[in-house]
């Protein structure tokens, strides 16, 4: 009706008038269109979650002969036809930390391709358990750090945690940016998807089969101690978007609190917090300033200070630019950086 013709795609130009027709109003922090699109993405996410459970349940009814247990993993989980299944329906009520353990087991067991419909339904029904006490449980904090420190499967696990809303319930500030659209020409992903895309890009630097894409980043990542520190930095670099104010400054407080609560050492905490503050600096200097000017280099060096920071900032900047859109990266930007 707004386009006055057949229109199946909700393009940028139509988002604002459509949002206003629904009664959304722009605030200092968010445009009306961003509020509408967030509601849309949350609804689509819920439909996807419920449809996945429903389809898996129908498959189990249609093909009962293929539904045997392949093996027992521990007292809480079994592997069933390549999916992670809970051993009993009330496992999360009895042991709430098993919610995060499910994603750790998923990472650690290469034969498991996803969570079964029964497990997904149990996680959905256990959402009331994921409260303040659950977030503060030392065992849950340990499990979350274990998920970030695994040698493989981190990207898949965090995406699955986001899809099932567990990530947003564990990191409340992450929940605030789920479905948060960025109404500009560069970001084609919502903020939560952009963050997970940046994390995916960092992980690819560490994987040998992707080394040909960015050989220099692969070399740097191979020599970088405790790469999980970069993943924490990636999780928090845009976490304060859409709150009003400078998202870098607001995100620093979130990052510092997370590091303190998860017993991350002072040096690594300083690196994470510093990166959240400075994550736009390198791309700004490379693309908008004269890097042949010694004064520019001197100023940049006085901000960065150490080689570890420089290495971290370089890899995270490459991953961040690539994570805004599939088309935004080019050889010229690579050369400037």
Image (cartoon, rainbow, N blue to C red):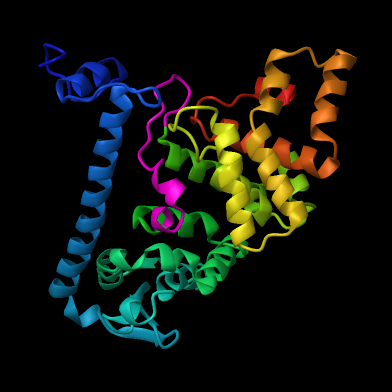
Q: Going 28% across and 21% down the picture, which residue do you hit?
A: 11
Vertical relation: 253 (above or below) 91: above
Chief secondary structure of the magenta span? Answer: loop
Q: Nearer the viewer, residue 54 or 243?
A: 243
Q: Nearer the viewer, residue 201 or 254?
A: 254
In the image, the segment drawn in magenta is 167-188
User: In the rendered structure, does residue 178 fall within the stretch colored magenta?
Assistant: yes
Vertical relation: 38 (above or below) 11: below
Q: Position of residue 336 (x, y in %)?
A: 73, 21
Res. 178 image quadrant: top left
Q: Position of residue 163 (x, y in %)?
A: 35, 53
Q: How many marks overall?
A: 0
Q: Nearer the viewer, residue 74 or 284?
A: 284
Compared across the picture, whether 55 is left or right of 319 comes to: left
Q: Position of residue 314 (x, y in %)?
A: 72, 36
Vertical relation: 318 (above or below) 289: below
Q: Quadrant of the N terminus?
A: top left
Q: Quadrant of the C terminus?
A: top right
User: In the rendered structure, does residue 179 fall within the stretch colored magenta?
Assistant: yes
Q: Going 11% across and 13% down the picture, which residue do you hit?
A: 5
Compared across the picture, whether 298 is left or right of 210 comes to: right
Vertical relation: 109 (above or below) 317: below
Q: Going 40% across and 70% down the picture, which residue do you hit?
A: 99
Q: Is residue 103 visible?
A: yes
Res. 25 image quadrant: top left
Q: Is residue 214 visible?
A: no
Compared across the picture, whether 315 is left or right of 156 comes to: right
């Amino acid at each position: 009706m707004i386009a006055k013709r057949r229109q199946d795609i909700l393009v940028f130009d139509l988002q604002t008038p459509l949002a206003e027709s629904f009664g959304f109003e722009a605030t200092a922090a968010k445009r009306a269109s961003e509020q509408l699109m967030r509601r849309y993405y949350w609804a689509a996410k819920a439909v996807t979650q419920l449809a996945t459970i429903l389809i898996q349940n129908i498959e189990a009814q249609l093909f009962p002969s293929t539904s045997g247990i392949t093996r027992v993993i521990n007292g809480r989980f079994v592997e069933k036809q390549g999916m992670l299944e809970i051993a009993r329906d009330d496992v999360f009520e009895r042991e709430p930390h098993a919610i995060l353990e499910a994603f750790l087991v998923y990472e650690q067991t290469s034969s498991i391709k996803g969570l079964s419909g029964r497990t997904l339904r149990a996680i959905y029904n256990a959402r009331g358990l994921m409260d303040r006490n659950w977030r503060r449980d030392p065992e849950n904090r340990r499990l979350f750090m274990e998920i970030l420190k695994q040698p493989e499967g981190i990207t898949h696990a965090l995406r699955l945690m986001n899809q099932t809303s567990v990530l947003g319930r564990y990191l409340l500030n992450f929940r605030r940016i789920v479905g948060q659209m960025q109404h500009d020409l560069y970001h084609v992903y919502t903020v939560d998807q952009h963050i997970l895309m940046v994390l995916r890009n960092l992980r690819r630097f560490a994987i040998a089969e992707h080394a040909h894409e960015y050989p220099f980043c692969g070399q740097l990542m191979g020599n970088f101690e405790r790469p999980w520190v970069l993943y924490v930095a990636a999780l928090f670099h845009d976490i304060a978007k859409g709150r009003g104010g400078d998202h870098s400054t607001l995100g620093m407080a979130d990052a510092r609190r997370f590091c303190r609560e998860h017993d991350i050492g002072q040096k690594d905490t300083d690196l994470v917090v510093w990166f959240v503050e400075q994550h736009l600096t390198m791309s700004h200097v490379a693309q908008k300033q004269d890097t042949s000017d010694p004064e520019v280099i001197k100023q940049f060096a006085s901000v960065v200070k150490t080689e570890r920071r420089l290495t971290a900032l370089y890899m995270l900047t490459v991953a961040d630019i690539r994570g805004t859109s599939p088309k935004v990266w080019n050889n010229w930007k690579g050369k400037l950086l």
